[in-house]
Amino acid sequence: MVGDTIFGLRQRRTFKKMVGSARTRLYRMAYAWTHDPYLADDMVQQTLCKALNNQRQLRDMAAADAWLFRILANCLKDHYRAKREVLLGDDQVRVEYVTPETQTQEQQLVDSVRLAVSRLPLAQCQVITLVDLEGFTYAKVAETLEIPVGTVMSRLCRGRAALRNTLLDAKSQLPTEQAGTVTRIRQIRENNG
Amino acid sequence: MDKVDKFSEEQLNAFVDGELDSDEKSRVFNESQRSQELDQRLCQQRKLKELVKHAYLDVPAPMRRQDLRGRQGGFWRSAVAASVLLLLGVTIGFYAQEFTGQHYVVRGSESGLVSVESVSHPVVGGRKYILHVASGQSEDMFLALETAQYLLDSAAPGQVNRVEVVANESGLNLLRSDVTPFANEIQLLQENNVVFYACSRTIERLEEKGVEVDLLPDANHSFTALDRIVLRMKDDWEYIKI
């Protein structure tokens, strides 16, 4: 009656193990998408709660990764929608990464990459980070974000082109230090391109 | 889209990401041996990929308010208060983190002596349940308490089931002393060793909005709901969402 799921005992254990081990990866991804540790943590909390509540939806443990990260992406989408901070226009700016005041040279490099990533449209950021941080195949990214593989490839192209121009262009400069509190979301729009 | 030596950016990305089939991969590879421009572009792509990976190897974790409260002495004030209670001769029992499957009972006496006993789990084979309440609807909260009682009652002969109730989101109303209609029922369950947890994250959010959160006596608020649920599930507790 109570708490019985449709999973067998082995699947239940595998699911629990999977949820426990995914937390760090989910947080890393959520941070890469938001650059806000508190928001990232919130998103992961919501994701794992939803995963626990809806574990019956997961029929194939092999698809668990894509399923979990899909939940994460949807949680973030719902969060932005709820904030209703959507303005007209083609530009999409999320929370900009704030560089700390004191930086080592290595930290400067990390900060410049994070700033560049934070300036990408969310759609491009998600594709790039799923491929580069999690090693997802294009097909898995497509499954996770529920978009065609062709869209994955085109977003990857645009995103990496933007990063290349910012980070590897000889004329580009490292970002100046930004003290103070995090710049809140100014414009968000779902970018399909 | 720009092409480099007849290959599109998408092809070059796919090459770097290992997404090309072997024939196409060979074509790109062979051409990169001949074309410095192509070779440079591929190097750039690989470098970019590594930069992104490197930038997120170590990511900052959020500092939770409860950690800050601890640093400000809140936790230690609670510990001192607990010690005072013991010295006054109040016998209390509480459970420490049960990573080892053991639990600990602290007993105080009128003389002020304190003993800590490590006891093995009092029963063999009793089942363990963690109930999750996220709804503030009266019928849901009532169902949670009814379920907790049922789980206690349904233990096999000679066994005792263990039950914890975790409340978050609007379900926190179950444990708020100024809101809950079930204070007496909860007290009875607590006397039968049902442990109630109020999600620390939900409390933080409410306090940020200026809401004063007063919990029922003995409602634990040291964990977020998720932390407690995951901790228990790792230890084979059965999770039930109300």
Image (cartoon, rainbow, N blue to C red):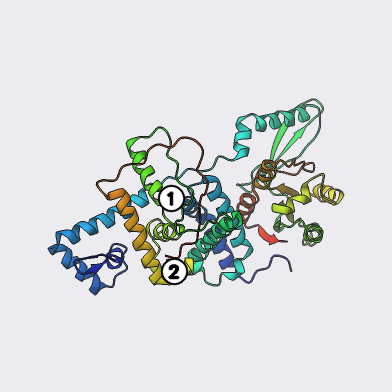
Q: Secondary structure at mark 2?
A: helix
Q: Residue furthest right?
A: B184
Q: Residue at x 29, y 70 (%)?
A: B20
The dot on residue B91 is none
Rendering coords of residue A180 (x, y %): 49, 35
Residue B92 lies left or right of residue B208; in this view the side is right
The crowd level at tag 2 (other Cα within 10 Å; few <14, some 14-19, many 20+) is many
Residue that appears at 46% across and 57% down = A122
Among all residues in the image, which is located at the extreme top? B111
Q: Is residue A189 visible?
A: yes
Is residue B164 visible in the rendered structure shown here? no
Tell me which amino acid carries mark 2. Answer: Ala
Q: Is residue A34 above or below residue A90?
A: above
Q: Earlier in the sequence, mark 2 or mark 1?
A: 1
Q: Chain of mark 1?
A: A
Residue linked to disc 2: A142
Residue B181 placed where, x, y %? 85, 51
Q: Residue at x 28, y 56 (%)?
A: B46
Out of B201 and B231, give the one closest to the viewer.
Answer: B201
Label 2 or label 1, whichever lies nearer to me, is 1
Quarter holding the N terminus of chain B is bottom left
Which residue does the image show at 67% across and 47% down from the upper left? B202
Residue B143 x %, y %? 80, 61
Q: Label 1, on which residue?
A: A118
**Is B194 in front, or is A154?**
A154
Mark 1 Cα shell of 10 Å, populated few (<14), some (14-19), many (≥20): many
- Judging from the image, what secondary structure is the residue with disc 1 in? helix
Check disc 1 and give the amino acid type: Ser
